[in-house]
Image: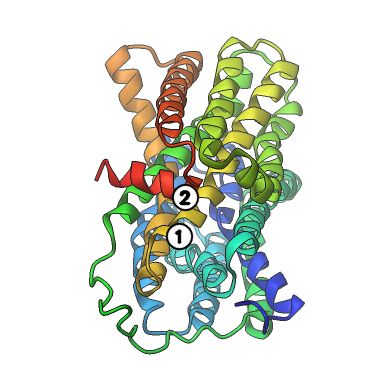
Amino acid sequence: MKNSKLTKFNVFTMLLIPFVWIYELSVVAPILGSVAAAFPDASTFQLQLIVIMPFFASIPMSVVAGKLAKRFDKKNLIIFGLLIYGVAGMLPFLAHTMNQILICRFLTGIGVGLVLPLPNAMIAEHFEGAKRERMLGLATAVANVANVLDSIAVGFILLLGWRFPFLAFGVCLVIMVVAIFGLPKSDPGSKPAEVAGHLPSKDIPKVAYALVAFMAVNWMFFAFNITNMALFMVTEKIGLPWMIGIGICLPGLASILSGAIFPNFYHKTKSFIVPISIAIFAAGYVVMYFTHTFATQSIANILIGFGSGMLTPYILNLTSQKVEKSHRDAAYGLVTSGIHIGFLSAPFVQLAIATASGNETFRFLFGLSAAALVTAAVVSVFVAAKTPGKTVSTLAGEEIESVV
């Protein structure tokens, strides 16, 4: 087995790195109100930039990280990325102007981009089959555990002032120390040898680019819920103010569950894992569209988190199956950048929908999301039914390749 030489500490450390996958979002998003009060002249656009600025750097850096992994040890790249992530993440604590904060946030994205794809690439390198599926599912679960814990912790830290939550990025430096001692070496090795008379392709296969789009769309729909939840609850007068934090935690908690049970769900549903997951995702938005109480909204959040959370490890596992080993590191860099592409695109897509429709209400956005996801679920059911005897990976690979 590939993982025969790994210790439990090695495995623990691999799963610890995803703790900071979306840390730059979950730590900062809850503090925007306090930042706005500290900088009353700042525009709404500037405040939004504080949240999304790291993505402008992390998306290209995720691609660069995949390419660098062909030449350098992934362990060293992750350690260097965590160093940048932690130091740049804490720097806004010292900032005195909005532009200083934005520059620090951009630098934070460089570290994020280096850290984001490489744990998945290491998992694909050291694990095979069901163990790899389980590890990828657990990695997604860990990322969502962090999102839940951050949302709760930042609320208390914020009582000290808007600057102090930025010090939470010191967690990245703690994880860096653990990585120094716990991550296994990941030698990029020599150029791949000729296999069965054929040299590997010099180019990343087109399926990897389609998987980027799949990942981005998944996280864009997920972001529609997360980024609008607080305002939706306030404008619709759903629940009490203290319930907003609970509402924000629920999709992450559901994603933790889906990531943990992904391997079993994957093998039981076979070629229908995609339509089932999308259908659950769609059901969440249907409930969200009609909700007027915190109880039904909670059900909607759980369904949205579970459906979206099941798709992420599926996409990551499919990447390892459909991309040959010589291009796997670069492919993971591309595919995982889709997470931040989804978050970055969400506010712009939401604005475009509001402009085109003339309706900027949250219910309209949720209803449109439900309709789009229902359509996608129906289409994927027909595709899965066409070849019921094939495995999910084979089916999905052919489906994605058919559109590129």
Which residue type carries mark 1? Gln
Q: Decide if residue 186 is on the left or right side of residue 246.
A: left
Up/down of 360 relative to 402, above or below: above
Q: Nearer the viewer, residue 33 or 329?
A: 329
Toward which corner of the image does residue 343 lie, by quadrant?
top left
Up/down of 270 relative to 276, above or below: below
Q: How many marks?
A: 2
Image coordinates of residue 64 in percent, x first then y, are: 34, 69
Q: Nearer the viewer, residue 77 or 92?
A: 77
The residue to which callout 2 is attached is 393
Q: Tell me what residue is drawn at x 52 percent, y 75 percent.
A: 78
The residue to which callout 1 is attached is 321
Q: Nearer the viewer, residue 381 or 187?
A: 381
Image coordinates of residue 329 in percent, x first then y, are: 41, 70
Q: Are marks 1 and 2 in contact (CB under 8 Å)?
A: yes
Residue 336 has which mark?
none
Toward which corner of the image does residue 43 lie, by quadrant?
top left
Label 1's element?
helix
Q: Decide if residue 308 is on the left or right side of residue 199.
A: right
Query: Closer to the N terminus: mark 1 or mark 2?
Result: 1
Image coordinates of residue 27 in percent, x first then y, are: 61, 50
Image coordinates of residue 157 in percent, x first then y, are: 73, 50
Up/down of 295 relative to 394, above or below: above
Up/down of 146 relative to 5, above or below: above
Q: Tell me what residue is drawn at x 40 percent, y 68 percent.
A: 328
Q: Tell me what residue is drawn at x 71 percent, y 43 percent.
A: 257
Label 2's element?
helix
User: Crowdedness of circle 2 by 10 Å Cα count: few (<14), some, many (20+)?
Assistant: some
Which residue type carries mark 2? Ser
**Residue 41 seen anywhere in this rendered image of the structure:** no
Spatial CA distance of label 1 from label 2 is 7 Å
